[in-house]
Amino acid sequence: MEMIFALITLIGALFLFLGALGLVRMPDVYNRMQAGTKATTLGTILFSLGIGLANFGSGWCGKIVIIILFVIATNPVSSNVIARAAHFSGIKLAKLSLKDELKEDDEKTEGGTL
Amino acid sequence: MVSLIYQISAGLIILSLLLTLFRLFKGPTVADRIVALDAMTIISISLIVLIAHIAQRIIYLDVAIVYGLVSFIGVVAFARYLERGL
Amino acid sequence: MNKAKSFIIATILLFITWILLSGIATQEVIFGGITALIISLLFLTRLTVLGDIKFGIKPFIFSIGYFFLFSWELLKSNLDVARRVISPKLPINPGIVKVKTKLKSPLGRAFLANSITLTPGTLTVEMRGEYFYIHWIDVTGCDINCATDKIVAKFEKYLEVIFG
């Protein structure tokens, strides 16, 4: 039984590693953010879940649940905030991008909101 | 066998921390560096949870929670700085 | 009405968080928690967002369904990211598209934006009224209606019942 929980932890670590690898390989900020946010979220969830199940009871589970809910709630918000700031501070998309409707709309209304 | 799996997980986490550190140093723009910092803190939370399991101390989990809180506030402050110069 | 409902939900949520965080439930912990809760809720007079949550049988069933849909999409998006990162050619054709939502309540829109960020290949960049601007890793040359169908519709069906 302990073996299965350790394997859940290992899968979580593997997703964390893939997220970091995506952070290095992707071409621009927005794609890096995609890889970084998604993979690290599921990685942290699985990692904490494996360790929480291995120490079932005795006050571990509550804190692990708090950590998991906290990561689910804050991780997308922080990546959304960074993406918005990056777009408005004028960082361009990579060369191979197909279209950018936010920029088109901003140019239509002359300068955008901000 | 179980401890070997935990050692492999710790190795993977260290490796991913090194990769994010590479992006933190190299990143061409400021936003790249903030993204790398964000990913790094989240990976560090996992590392702290693993250390809490190895040392068998519940109190270390509080460190992970507080670290997550502070890093979230920090990332929002960085993004605000990037957007309109604080 | 909305304010009272929001107040009660906030009280219950904060109390559950306090019990989970302290780990033990002795008398001192519970009474100390209730005292701190009363003091902090005295400063919480402008919170009306949580009042959008609906109670009843149907929203409860739909929130369980939403939980399973969300977990499934999270797993799928991670496998998708892993596939794209590992393959040596890096098969991406990204772009920013615009979608439209039917949801009215602010909390529902926040949930929708977070769900979009954690689903396969999409990332919310900006919310402007009822339009969302989404960075999509695999744009397949379609207009606003088709993008709305592909990205938003599956979550909207559930969130419409839960939050209105």
Image: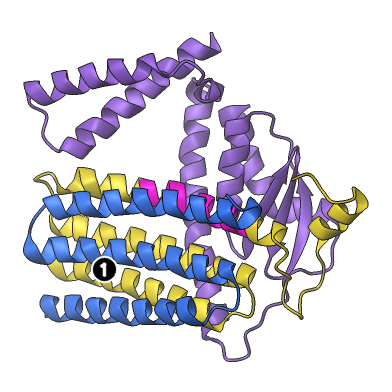
Chain colours: A yellow, B blue, C purple
**Residue A67 visible:** yes
Q: Position of residue C134 (x, y in %)?
A: 70, 56
Report which quarter residue C155 is drawn in: top right
Q: Residue at x 22, y 61 (%)?
A: B49
Q: As displayed, is residue C40 above or below residue A50?
A: above
Label 1 residue SS: helix
Amino acid type of disc 1?
A: Thr
Q: Where is residue A68 in the image (x, y as percent from the top left)?
A: 34, 51
Q: Quadrant of the C terminus of chain A?
A: top right
Q: Does residue A24 appear left or right of residue A100 in this picture?
A: left
Answer whether residue A79 is magenta in the image: yes
Q: As displayed, is residue C79 above or below residue A88?
A: below
The residue at which mark 1 appears reads as: A9
Q: Residue furthest top?
A: C1
Report which quarter residue C7 is drawn in: top left
Magenta highlight range: A70-83
| 10 Å crowding of disc 1: few (<14), some (14-19), many (20+) | many
Q: Position of residue C160 (x, y in %)?
A: 64, 32
Q: Position of residue A67 (x, y in %)?
A: 30, 50
Q: In which quarter of the image is the N terminus of chain A?
A: bottom left
Q: Does residue C77 appear left or right of residue C164 in this picture?
A: left
